[in-house]
Image (tube, rainbow, N blue to C red):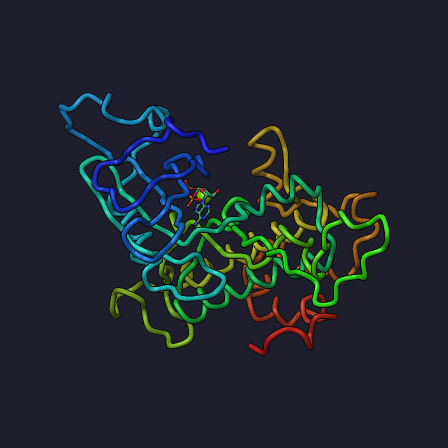
Amino acid sequence: KENKGKLPTYPGLSRYKLLEKMGDGAFSNVYRALDLEGNQGEVAIKVVRKYELNSSQPDNHLHPDFKKVPKTVERANILKEVQIMKQLDHPNIVKLIEFQECRSYYYIVLELLKGGELFHQIVRLTYFSEDLSRHVITQVADALKYLHEVKGVVHRDIKPENLLFEPIPFVPSKNPKPVQPGDEDKEDEGEFIPGVGAGGIGRIKVADFGLSKVVWDTQTMTPCGTVGYTAPEIVRDERYSKSVDMWALGCVLYTLLCGFPPFYDESINVLTEKVAKGQYTFLSPWWDNISKSAQDLISHLLTVDPDERYDINQFLNHPWIRGTKEETRPAR
Ligand code: ADP
Ligand code: MG
């Protein structure tokens, strides 16, 4: 379903041929594209419209996709997103390929994740089994461990829309079943791979570093960026900021297991109040058949006091995570 003809041509982006519009964020449009000059193959390109403060240019040279962009994107924010992504190299984090800009747009060229958003899989499957949830959340946690402990980066926008995946490829059976008379037309069903089979959820990658931030490094106690003059309350705040990702991780895990988020209300004021008080429940009947161990883990993440909330290592050492998959998981 490639909407040919509708795809815009962007100035200075001739190296790539746009193939399909994939994402429609508030500040950006994301396209699947082909690298015509290099050997990148297919990539994802996040196109962000520039803010033109005193532009005398009318906006009609902009593609209609951008007419509804509600707010301006500060140059510093884009550069920070790119700067942070440049420093990251982890199997569970979307890789930055290159950054370009022209007069009207920024172009962030990224490794393509063909599966798309985890969000759509939750909608498609209603909810995930405990094994599939563990398969997913452990990969997100591995990315967070790297961000928090190696890079001193907090993501600050962990949610199912920003978690992308590679679909599980079809792998032909090593020992195909002997063909029975009458079944000559049936296709090989393929090797069974945990996930949800071919097309299901393989590797998960964290995307969208638009709100991410480098923080105080608690391990070396060295400030990242500035030197020596940071006030105690800032240092304390920065330490807490990693815990915002852990809260979000708890919200994602809750949502994976039951198919709806822990905190919801139509009124934003009521919702805010519920979050502030940490008011959520393991709602019956949806949670009746989900293990107490999973609920225990979630309750240690959805803890209002950030000092008591699990950090990434406590998360990874919880029995529900280590559980059955212990021996098949790589040591970390
Ligand atoms: P925004 O800041 O607008 O949320 P994102 O970086 O989250 O921008 O991208 C918006 C959407 O585009 C994502 O939710 C996803 O659907 C899609 N997308 C972004 N990056 C990729 C990628 N590397 N591969 C596939 N789809 C992507
Ligand atoms: Mg996003």
Q: Position of residue 245 (x, y in %)?
A: 51, 56
Q: Nearer the viewer, residue 325 or 200?
A: 200
Residue 68 shows in the view? yes
View quadrant of ligand 2: top left
> Is residue 269 found left or right of 258 in the rendered image?
left
Q: Is residue 25 toward the left or the right of residue 284 in the image?
A: left
**Looking at this view, is 268 or 168 the one in front?**
168
Query: Relative to 310, is 192 on the left or the right?
Result: right
User: Looking at the image, how many numbered discs can be counted on the residues?
Assistant: 0
Q: Residue at x 61, y 29 (%)?
A: 266
Residue at 36% x, 31% y: name it. 7
Q: Is residue 298 visible?
A: no
Residue 139: where, in percent of width, then height? 57, 62
Quadrant assignment for the C terminus: bottom right
254 up-or-down from 237: above or below? above
Q: Position of residue 220 (x, y in %)?
A: 38, 77
Where 72 falls versus 77 (above or below)?
above
Q: Is residue 7 left or right of residue 274?
A: left
Q: Give coordinates of residue 187: x percent, y percent.
A: 72, 51
Q: Nearer the viewer, residue 151 or 277?
A: 151
Residue visible at 26% across and 46% down in the picture: 15
> Does 319 sit above or below residue 209?
below
At a point 59% along the width and 56% down the height, the residue shown is 169
